[in-house]
Amino acid sequence: MNGKISQIDALSKSLEVAEMRHKVVSQNLANVNTPNYHAVDLDFQKTLDAQLSDQKLTEDGVELFERPDLVLRADGNNVDVDLEVGDLNKNVMLYQTYTQLLSAKLGQMRTAIAGR
């Protein structure tokens, strides 16, 4: 192998990072009524770069950061439901796109192997 990551590997790692981000955003939504909970996020590109460089991040090893510029409510919680739902929808579309690209790439390989 020439040291380059294959398109299939890159797409599968992109799916893994999208899944990690989905869990983080879902956790924020699940804690919308938890006093003193502060919404967190992960840097998609930074996490993907780490995955692509074979740093083998686990969910515990993902670097999360507190979301900036969110309004703190009286109970100390800063989760913005509209923002989180928007991010969740964006992440779902990203995941679906990566899935479709991976499926198309595997279909091309299947066709090449079959010799059609």
Image (cartoon, rainbow, N blue to C red):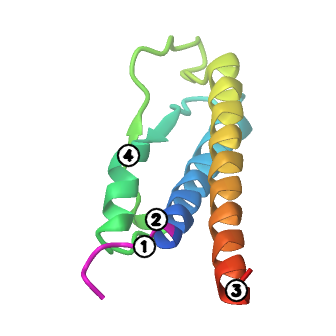
- Regarding residue 5, the answer to whether it shows in the image is yes
Cα distance between the residues tagged 4 and 3: 37 Å
Q: How far is mark 4 from mark 2, CA to CA?
A: 12 Å
Determine whether 90 is above or below 101 in the image.
Answer: above
> Seen from this angle, which residue lies furthest front?
116
Residue drawn at x 36%, y 72% as measured from the top left: 5
- Give me the disc on residue 10: 2
Q: Earlier in the sequence, mark 4 or mark 1?
A: 1
Q: SS class of the residue under badge 3?
A: loop
Magenta region, mostly helix, strand or loop?
loop
Please identify, in this view, whether the residue under mark 4 or under mark 3 is nearer the observer: 3
Q: Which residue is mark 4?
A: 45
Q: Which residue is mark 1?
A: 6
Q: Earlier in the sequence, mark 3 or mark 1?
A: 1
Read off the residue under disc 3.
115
The answer to which of marks 2 and 3 sits earlier in the sequence is 2
Q: Residue 4, located in which quarter of the rendered image?
A: bottom left
Residue nearest the viewer, comparing 82 with 104? 104
- The verdict on residue 4 being magenta is yes
Q: Residues within 10 Å of mark 4 (few under 14, many from 20)?
A: few
Eye-nearest disc, 4 or 1:
1
Instruction: Tell me the residue at 53%/62% (across/down).
Output: 11
Where in the figure is residue 80, as x and y percent of width and height? 62, 19
Q: Which residues are magenta?
A: 1-7
Q: Amino acid at mark 3?
A: Gly
* Mark 2 vs 1: CB contact within 8 A: yes
Question: How far, Cα to Cα, is label 3 from label 1?
Answer: 21 Å
- Residue at 43% across, 28% down: 67
Q: Between residues 27 and 112, which one lies in front from this camera angle?
A: 112
Q: Are marks 3 and 1 in contact (CB under 8 Å)?
A: no
Q: Residues within 10 Å of mark 1 (few under 14, many from 20)?
A: few
